[in-house]
Amino acid sequence: MPGSYVWTGTAVDGALDAMNCDGWTNPSGMGVVGSLVEVGVAWTAYSSLSCSMQGRFYCFED
């Protein structure tokens, strides 16, 4: 995973997104990433990447 992305699995409103690699247990599919260098909603929901890629996580507690 490029260094400026971080796994979040969240939508722009902070809610859980369906693209979260089956709760981070499945290396197939896609997961939502945020950007370490963006502001606004992009810090948590910037793009989606293949779940097989390794990267940092932002963990959110409800």
Image (cartoon, rainbow, N blue to C red):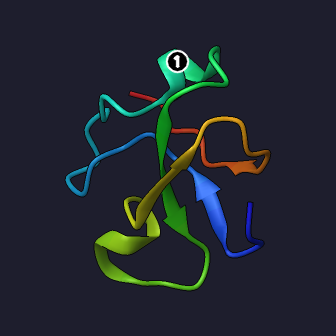
Q: Residue at x 40, y 67 (%)?
A: 46
Horizontal relation, residue 11 to residue 53: left or right = left
Q: Nearer the viewer, residue 57 or 27?
A: 27
Horizontal relation, residue 9 to residue 27: left or right = left
Where's residue 29, x and y in %? 50, 30
Q: In the figure, residue 12 lies in which quadrant?
A: bottom left
Q: Determine whether 5 is above or below 7 in the image.
A: below
| Residue bearing the label numbered 1 | 23
Q: In the figure, residue 1 lies in which quadrant?
A: bottom right
Q: Residue at x 38, y 34 (%)?
A: 19
Quarter of the C terminus within the rendering: top left
Q: Residue furthest left?
A: 13
Element carrying mark 1: helix
Task: Please rate how many residues cluster around mark 1, counting C-alpha atoms within 10 Å: few if below 14, some from 14 to 19, many from 20.
Answer: few
Where's residue 56, x and y in %? 75, 51
Where's residue 34, x and y in %? 49, 62
Q: Nearer the viewer, residue 54 or 12?
A: 54
Counting labels gives: 1
Q: Determine whether 22 is above or below 57 in the image.
A: above
Where's residue 60, x and y in %? 50, 38
> Mark 1: which amino acid?
Gly
Q: Determine whether 10 is above or below 23 in the image.
A: below
Q: Residue at x 37, y 60 (%)?
A: 45
Q: Residue at x 52, y 18 (%)?
A: 23
